[in-house]
Image (cartoon, helix red, strand yellow):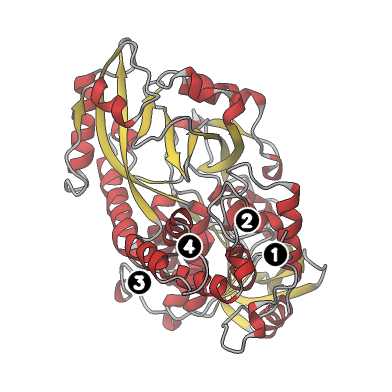
């Protein structure tokens, strides 16, 4: 077995451009007064930090765990217009979602988003008829200006050629539409990198232990580095609470009497090995409002999601036996039994949707983004969808510009003067990147495997060449982390030195796909931890 712990940190290379150490980052955060301190490294906080840094503000971003460590890496992995929103007549919302989806998948991050065909099966006795769903997918595609083709209806036999495990008993027709798919953790990390490239200073695994006040106004935060226990603080002219499910916890630090502002809905998912290749996804109506998805994703099958109110500690959210049974039962409406064996499950995860406070069924609640100001002047942002993450960042920035007294307006460029579709790092045609990786390997020695080349191209874009360079310079880094996964050890070294990875879970769950494939074995975890420990 190759020994990896002797591989040096990239920072030993003068031209490596690796990240500053945590101690250096803490020192930088402690010495300055920032225009904006964003607390919370989910996609809402990350997007706001990115847009704020673009606008010229001095920005700091901290998170108690890892970037996208909670709900932002526990989504259904979709960039979508929201077909079900047509049920409620939210035509404008669907059109806006489509605009953002197309912008991300075609101009902002085409290297991280993949087009995906969806089949919507119409069964005898189901909640919707073929004519209604056919009209629905046509209207859906019209709202995207038919940029992904025209929504239409096909025969069950044709659909089964693309989805071999499709259940055809009592299947009358199949409606077709298109959306996009992503690896949410990778998309979030690239957005963090974009924020840093724009000037933001970021630190994960740094928990807020208290807020700083000046004459009753929130002017910073006290923090504790969970990796070594170091305590430090950050001063800021304005603090943004973007802590997702924990938003009310931080609001109570500002004002112990703050009333609850949100409610939470749990969404659970299962990841299974596929018994046969799928070339399309299934979106099966369960009732008038809910759809269950079966998505080919990362060479696996992703099933979900549930939608139930959650009142416990956000840190304790998990997939229960009841969740697993519900997901499999609902999937069985349209998927054959052999694909739904529990023996095929490799991973399960649950996230919490943040919804506006109030009564009613969570499945019918609007996915709105709410920005509020507390008595100490701290802004809190909560709720929204992955698809509109850029729009949410702009919305928060417009709110900052319009604050009473305009404390930051003079120092920031208005959103309407900034590029509307600034790309994320690594933007490239992934097919071209994969081709280059395959033909440009080292002259002596083996060339990169096709599945590894494709994986790197679709998760890093042109940054994949930096990983290939590491593998070429250190042959042990060219080896697979696990025989059954496309990842190579160079990705672990790269995560350590360029992507803020501090723990094995940071690497295995969010920067690679080892965990979701069920391949994060004790041996793999031990070797990852040894490589992470070998820093400057």
Residue 118: image x %, image y %? 32, 35
Q: Which mark is residue 502?
A: 1
The N terminus sits in image quarter: bottom right
261 or 27, which is in the foreground? 27
Distance between the alpha carbons at the discs numbered 2 and 1? 18 Å
Distance between the alpha carbons at the discs numbered 3 and 1? 34 Å
The earlier-in-sequence mark between 2 and 1 is 2
Residue 443: image x %, image y %? 46, 75
Compared with residue 203, is residue 486 higher up or lower down, i.e. above or below?
above
Label 1 sits on a secondary structure element that is loop
Distance between the alpha carbons at the discs numbered 4 and 3? 43 Å
Quickly name the residue at label 4. 448
Please say if the residues under marks 2 and 1 sit with CB atoms less than 8 Å apart: no
Query: Which quadrant would residue 86 be assigned to in this image?
Result: top left
The earlier-in-sequence mark between 3 and 2 is 3
Quickly name the residue at label 3. 415
The earlier-in-sequence mark between 3 and 1 is 3
Query: Which quadrant would residue 154 be assigned to in this image?
Result: top left
The earlier-in-sequence mark between 4 and 3 is 3
Please say if the residues under marks 4 and 2 sit with CB atoms less than 8 Å apart: no
The earlier-in-sequence mark between 1 and 4 is 4
Compared with residue 232, is residue 95 higher up or lower down, i.e. above or below?
above
The C terminus sits in image quarter: bottom right
The earlier-in-sequence mark between 4 and 2 is 4
Residue 126: image x %, image y %? 34, 15
Evaluate whether residue 382 shows in this view: yes
Distance between the alpha carbons at the discs numbered 4 and 2? 14 Å
């Amino acid at each position: 077995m190759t020994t990896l712990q002797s591989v040096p940190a990239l920072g030993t290379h003068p031209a490596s451009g690796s990240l500053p150490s945590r101690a250096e980052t803490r020192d930088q955060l402690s010495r300055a007064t920032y225009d904006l301190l964003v607390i919370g490294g989910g996609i809402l906080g990350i997007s706001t930090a990115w847009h704020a840094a673009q606008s010229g503000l001095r920005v700091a971003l901290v998170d108690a765990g890892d970037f996208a460590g909670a709900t932002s890496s526990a989504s259904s992995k979709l960039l979508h217009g929201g077909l079900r929103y047509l049920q409620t007549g939210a035509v404008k919302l669907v059109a806006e979602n489509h605009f953002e989806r197309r912008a991300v998948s075609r101009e902002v991050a085409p290297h991280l988003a993949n087009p995906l065909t969806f089949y919507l099966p119409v069964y005898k006795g189901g909640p919707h008829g073929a004519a209604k769903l056919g009209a629905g997918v046509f209207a859906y595609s019209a709202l995207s200006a038919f940029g992904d083709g025209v929504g239409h209806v096909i025969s069950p036999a044709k659909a089964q050629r693309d989805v071999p495990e499709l259940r055809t008993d009592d299947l009358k027709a199949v409606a077709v539409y298109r959306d996009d798919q992503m690896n949410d953790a990778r998309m979030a990390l690239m957005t963090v990198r974009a924020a840093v490239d724009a000037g933001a200073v970021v630190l994960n695994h740094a928990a807020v232990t208290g807020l700083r006040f000046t004459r009753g106004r929130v002017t910073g935060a006290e923090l504790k580095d969970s990796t070594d226990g170091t305590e430090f603080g950050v001063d800021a002219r304005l603090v943004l609470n973007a802590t997702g499910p924990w938003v009310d916890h931080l609001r109570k630090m500002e004002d112990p009497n703050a009333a609850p502002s949100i409610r939470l809905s749990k969404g659970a998912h299962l990841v299974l090995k596929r018994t046969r290749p799928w070339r399309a996804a299934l979106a099966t109506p369960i009732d008038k409002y809910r759809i269950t998805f079966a998505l080919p994703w990362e060479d696996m099958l992703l099933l979900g999601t549930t939608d139930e109110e959650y009142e416990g500690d956000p840190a304790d959210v998990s997939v229960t036996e009841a969740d697993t049974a519900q997901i499999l039962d609902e999937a069985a409406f349209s998927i054959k039994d052999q694909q739904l064996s529990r023996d095929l499950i490799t991973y399960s995860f649950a996230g919490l949707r943040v919804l506006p406070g109030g009564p009613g069924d969570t499945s019918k609640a609007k996915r709105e983004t709410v920005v509020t100001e507390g008595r100490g002047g701290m802004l809190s942002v909560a709720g929204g969808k992955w698809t509109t993450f850029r729009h949410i960042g702009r919305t928060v920035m417009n709110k900052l510009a319009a604050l009473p007294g305009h404390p930051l307006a003079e120092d920031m460029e208005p959103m309407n003067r900034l590029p509307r579709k600034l790309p994320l790092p690594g933007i490239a045609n992934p097919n071209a990147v994969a081709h280059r990786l395959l033909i440009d390997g080292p002259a002596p020695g083996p060339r990169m495997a096709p599945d590894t080349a494709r994986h790197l191209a679709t998760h890093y874009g042109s940054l994949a060449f930096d990983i290939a360079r590491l593998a070429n310079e250190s042959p042990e880094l060219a080896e697979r982390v696990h025989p059954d996964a496309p990842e190579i050890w160079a990705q672990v070294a790269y995560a350590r030195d360029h992507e803020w990875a501090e723990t094995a879970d940071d690497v295995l769950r969010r920067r690679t796909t080892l965990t979701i494939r069920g391949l994060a074995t004790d041996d793999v975890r031990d070797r990852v931890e040894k490589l992470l420990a070998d820093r400057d």
